[in-house]
Image: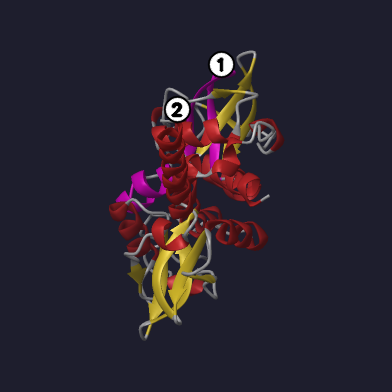
């Protein structure tokens, strides 16, 4: 009986290790279906496609070759420069309907081999300060891997369960807020100037929700809606938070379960930081 029990334990341990290894491989985490766009397409077309597919980036292809990437962050920067959704020209800048993807995209596309592991991808993203990597096999683009893809796998990775991996050490302690009456045009400018992907929306000084660059892209840029709207009317609420002191593993589970990429952290019911998908990757990369 002891021998059988030991054998059963070894089998379970082996199965768990196999499952863990599965989640360490880029090939098992990446998105194989890559959504692409032509460099001569307009930013308006890019925004519509991203909004329709509910994604934050498009690979830019020319002559069947990936030449760059355009992201929701790139579009946010364009908005901040005054290229708005209106059909007429704004000051001396072109409208978003006329500006070409080629003029805004980031290039070259940073790529990683499909044979590499999850930690390699995490370290490359942190080093390059990017949130997406093209995945290649023998020089051919076969997929894309994003911070969201990787965060989805982190609850299965043993390294995140280490007790000293608490959110306190990795979260951003700078919490950027905007009153519920702030216009979206100003919120977009704040996010671009601060290089952040979200703001916490407050009502009478108390946090009530969150507005992200994905909200801006999907609900406004992609639908030709004016940015002269108060953020309190369109933010996501109620605000999902977690207490300080929880582990990276627990935070990853919350973010995956709630389908969010940013988790505000509280202490004594007061906001003290925000944990992002990128922060999770930084913790895992170490």
Where does the N terminus fall, quadrant-wise?
top left
To which residue does mark 1 refer?
204
Q: Position of residue 275 (x, y in %)?
A: 59, 36
Q: Is residue 175 left or right of residue 37?
A: right
Q: Is residue 105 left or right of residue 51?
A: right
Q: Callout 1: helix, strand or loop?
A: loop
Mark 2 surroundings: few (<14), some (14-19) or many (≥20) residues within 10 A = many
Q: Callout 2: helix, strand or loop?
A: helix
Q: Position of residue 6 (x, y in %)?
A: 47, 36
Q: Which mark is residue 232?
A: 2
Q: Which mark is residue 191?
A: none
**What residue is drawn where x is 35% and y is 44%?**
219
Asked whether residue 38 is in view, the answer is: yes
Residue 108 colored magenta? no
* Residue 127 quadrant: bottom right
Question: Which of the pair 173/156 is nearer the observer?
Answer: 156
Q: Position of residue 202 (x, y in %)?
A: 54, 23
User: Between marks 2 and 1, how big is the CA–CA gap?
Assistant: 11 Å
Q: Of the residues under marks 2 and 1, which one precedes in the sequence?
A: 1
Question: Which of the pair 8/167 is nearer the observer?
Answer: 8
**What residue is drawn where x is 42% and y is 63%?**
27
User: Does 68 sit above or below residue 278?
Assistant: below
| Badge 2 vs badge 1, beta-carbon distance below 8 Å | no
Asked whether residue 95 is in view, the answer is: no
Region in magenta: 197-225
* Residue 122 quadrant: bottom right
* Residue 77 quadrant: bottom right
User: Does 15 sit above or below residue 75?
Assistant: above
């Amino acid at each position: 009986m002891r021998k059988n029990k030991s054998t059963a334990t070894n089998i379970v341990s082996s199965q768990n290790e196999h499952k863990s290894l599965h989640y360490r491989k880029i090939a098992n985490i990446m998105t194989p279906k890559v959504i692409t766009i032509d460099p001569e397409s307009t930013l308006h077309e890019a925004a519509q496609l991203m909004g329709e597919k509910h994604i934050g980036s498009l690979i830019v292809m020319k002559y069947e070759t990936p030449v760059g990437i355009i992201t929701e962050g790139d579009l946010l920067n364009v908005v901040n420069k005054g290229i708005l959704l209106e059909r007429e020209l704004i000051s001396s800048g072109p409208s978003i309907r006329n500006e070409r993807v080629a003029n805004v995209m980031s290039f070259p596309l940073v790529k990683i081999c499909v044979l590499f592991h999850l930690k390699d991808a995490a370290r490359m993203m942190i080093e390059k300060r990017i949130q997406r990597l093209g995945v290649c096999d023998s020089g051919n683009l076969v997929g894309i891997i994003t911070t969201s893809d990787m965060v989805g796998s982190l609850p299965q990775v043993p390294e995140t369960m280490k007790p000293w991996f608490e959110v306190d050490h990795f979260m951003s302690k700078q919490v950027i807020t905007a009153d519920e009456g702030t216009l979206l045009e100003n919120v977009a400018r704040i996010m671009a100037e601060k290089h952040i992907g979200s703001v916490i929306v407050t009502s009478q000084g108390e946090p009530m929700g969150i507005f992200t660059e994905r909200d801006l892209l999907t609900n406004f840029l992609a639908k030709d809606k004016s940015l002269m709207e108060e953020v309190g009317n369109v933010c996501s609420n109620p605000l999902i938070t977690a207490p300080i002191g929880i582990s990276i593993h627990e935070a990853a589970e919350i973010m995956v379960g709630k389908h969010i990429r940013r988790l505000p952290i509280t202490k004594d019911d007061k906001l003290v930081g925000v944990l992002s998908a990128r922060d999770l990757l930084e913790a895992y990369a170490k």
